[in-house]
Amino acid sequence: MITIPKNIQELVSYKPGKPVSQIIEELDLKESAILWNNENNLGPSPKVLEHVQSVLVTSHKYPDPTSHELCERIAALNNCTAENVTVDNGSESVFDCVFRAFFEKDNELLTCDGTFVAVYIWAKSNKVEVARIPLARGYQFDVDRLVQSVTPQTKAIYVANPNNPTGAMISQGELDHLVESVPDDVLIIVDEAYYEYARAITDDYPDSFAMRKSNVLTLRTFSKAYGIAGIRVGYALGDPRLIEALRKVKMTFAPSNLAQAAAIGALDDPDHMHKSVMLNKSALQQFYTALHDAELKYIPSYGNFVMIDLGTEDLAKAFTENMLKKGVFIRHLRAFGLPNCVRISTGTSEENELFTRKLLGT
Ligand SMILES: Cc1ncc(COP(=O)(O)O)c(C=O)c1O
């Protein structure tokens, strides 16, 4: 019998719930809003569709393994060169590469509780121990405590800014403090999956790549504001030494030529991205007003979602089920280690309106 390593045995494989269409049918929902995955419900730009269409005919060819054109385009946006960029099948794939590229036996990852769950999964599947500290008050990363928690085993620190699922942001001052306080042989991974949304919400959002530190690796994605989560393109920005190491361990032909074309199409339509982040900004205000009127506690967000603290796990579960019965699909955050909380993503104007109407019973 083949032995399955303990770290893999202990992982729980992704168990998708029932398909959305089945739930809609079973509950006989006349209207619905799918707001549980932090997607951009405006969908992809028409330019994405055009670009993908134009490369379909070359589907028999392997993709450019260096994603040269896409890396150049990302570099131009970030005032750097393509040597500072590597792209992959979503930023989650880049993160997986981080473990293979930088971690050695007994190295640990340091992060907080209550962050993006994939981090714990990829660490475990790469046999890397994760040292976790609690979130600070306000559900944000506790930078002081992270700094104090660095040990000789700490190879890297992971922070999501803003954090998913809490939506909280760390400031430029806190990021500076983190970078200045830890030894420069500790890698600081700053996951900026919601970068475009956060920048539209506040001028104070810190761009970790702009700090140009040799031990800071910035992760970004086309899955959120650019609206192509299903196509899977994410990237890392950082010092060429770090980027080169990541390129060595990535799957040779990732991402696919359709994905590279889609991302270039998305970059060709900055107006669509702008429209998406502005819609999100107004949706957040709409949600805050409704949540305030419903006397619910929420955490101000710098992403395309809001976390609501219901106070107890039972109330959070009941709120999630109640919303589902009304056609609004939201996420109960038990699996994120925040059982008293739920998360709702913003959607289209109609979807946002459906949520506020159902919340307030109007
Ligand atoms: C903080 C964070 N990082 C990364 C991702 C995943 O990004 P990608 O689709 O590029 O793998 C998500 C998706 O929800 C996220 O919330």
Image: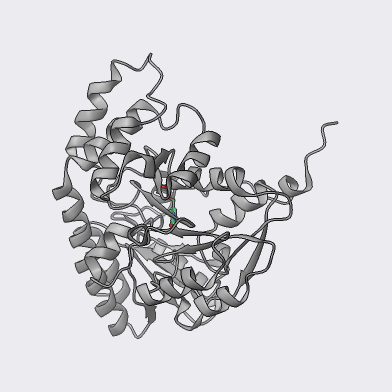
Q: Residue 161: x and y, percent?
A: 41, 65
Horizontal side of 54 relative to 299 (left or right) equals left
Q: Residue 15: x and y, percent?
A: 58, 48
> Looking at the image, can residue 142 be seen?
no
Q: Nearer the viewer, residue 210 or 129?
A: 210
- Figure quadrant of residue 229: top left
Q: Residue 130: x and y, percent?
A: 65, 61
Residue in view at x 23 percent, y 41 percent: 266
Q: Quick check: 123 above or below 134?
A: above
Q: Quick check: 89 above or below 281?
A: above
> Looking at the image, can residue 292 be seen?
yes
Q: Quick check: 257 above or below 120?
A: above
Furthest residue in direction right, as rendered: 1
Q: Nearer the viewer, residue 30 or 105?
A: 105
Quadrant including the C terminus? bottom left
Residue in view at x 17 percent, y 37 percent: 46
Give the color scheme: rainbow, by chain, secondary structure or one colour. Answer: one colour
Horizontal side of 128 relative to 255 (left or right) equals right
Quadrant including the N terminus? top right
- Figure quadrant of residue 38: bottom left
Q: Nearer the viewer, residue 79 or 69?
A: 79
Q: Quick check: 167 above or below 59?
A: below
Q: Nearer the viewer, residue 170 or 175?
A: 175
Residue in view at x 29 percent, y 20 percent: 56
Furthest residue in direction left, as rendered: 271
Question: How many marks on residues?
Answer: 0
